[in-house]
């Protein structure tokens, strides 16, 4: 189990909350738009990563990989992040967080499940109540940026209407309409502009244009030497 100290940012104000997470699930290949998902699959195939046997695929990862640290460590120079919305179930309620499914791409080429476990999964320290965005979920916009040659470069951008609705993901995963308390679920990502690649700084944000608010975070990657 891991404890995340976060802030609930709601229309009625802010409050501190402590989420105790004992299950972490990464929903892979979670595209609603088949064309966009095929594009992302092709991106990863170009890196030697096999096509999934089923879509979506649910990968279980140790919850200890979740953190809100400004710096994460990764072995070698083959990892990269992906902006994703994250569902957190607690006390019978559902919250929307923002995270990065940071993944080792070299390991992913021979074992996707193993690669998911290899890296930390950074998350922002703010969440929204799901009930406040449920009726306009598809209008939420995900973006990410990377720092390349000292320049801030747009890496991902698009509305989440290309991804499966979170209620659909929950039903496919649990067979019910509810996610068990203490569960965090990453909900899928968008194609990378210019292709999947490695970097040492990653920024992500989700914009709620209807309620005029944003959650964002940034982290650096400290490279640990791969000595074989």
Image (cartoon, helix red, strand yellow):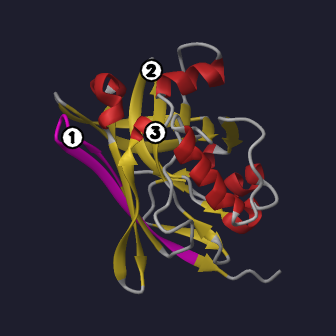
Residue 180 seen in the current view? no
Q: Secondary structure at mark 2?
A: loop
- For label 2, the residue is 91
Which disc, if any, is residue 162?
3
Figure check: 21 above or below 120: above
Q: Residues within 10 Å of mark 2 (few under 14, many from 20)?
A: few
Which disc, if any, is residue 30?
none
In the image, what residue occupies the spot 34% across and 30% down?
137
In the image, what residue occupies the spot 74% across and 44% down?
52
In this view, the residue farthest toward the front is: 35
Figure check: 195 above or below 21: below
The answer to whether residue 165 is left or right of residue 50 is left
* Magenta stretch in the rendered image: 205-222
Figure check: 87 above or below 102: above
Q: Residues within 10 Å of mark 3 (few under 14, many from 20)?
A: some
Tell me, yes or no, whether the highlighted magenta stretch contains residue 162: no
The answer to whether residue 108 is left or right of residue 91 is right
In the image, what residue occupies the spot 53% across and 16% down?
178
């Amino acid at each position: 189990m891991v404890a995340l100290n976060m802030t609930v940012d709601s229309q009625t104000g802010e409050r501190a909350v402590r989420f105790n997470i004992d299950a972490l699930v990464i929903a892979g290949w979670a595209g609603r738009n088949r064309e966009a998902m095929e594009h992302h699959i092709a991106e990863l195939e170009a890196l030697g990563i096999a096509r999934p046997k089923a879509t979506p695929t649910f990968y279980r990862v140790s919850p200890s990989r979740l953190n809100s640290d400004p710096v994460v460590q990764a072995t070698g120079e083959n990892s990269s992040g992906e902006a994703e919305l994250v569902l957190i179930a607690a006390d019978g309620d559902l919250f929307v967080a923002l995270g990065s499914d940071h993944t080792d791409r070299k390991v992913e080429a021979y074992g996707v499940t193993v690669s998911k476990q290899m890296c930390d999964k950074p998350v922002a320290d703010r969440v929204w109540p799901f009930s406040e965005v449920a009726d306009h979920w598809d209008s939420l916009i995900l973006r990410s940026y990377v720092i390349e040659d000292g320049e801030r470069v747009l890496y991902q951008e698009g509305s989440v209407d290309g991804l499966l609705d979170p209620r659909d993901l929950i039903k496919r995963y649990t067979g019910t309409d509810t996610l068990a308390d203490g569960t965090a679920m990453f909900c899928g990502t968008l194609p990378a502009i210019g292709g999947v690649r490695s970097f040492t700084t990653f920024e992500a944000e989700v914009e709620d244009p209807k309620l005029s608010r944003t959650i964002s975070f940034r982290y650096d990657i400290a490279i640990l030497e791969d000595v074989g």
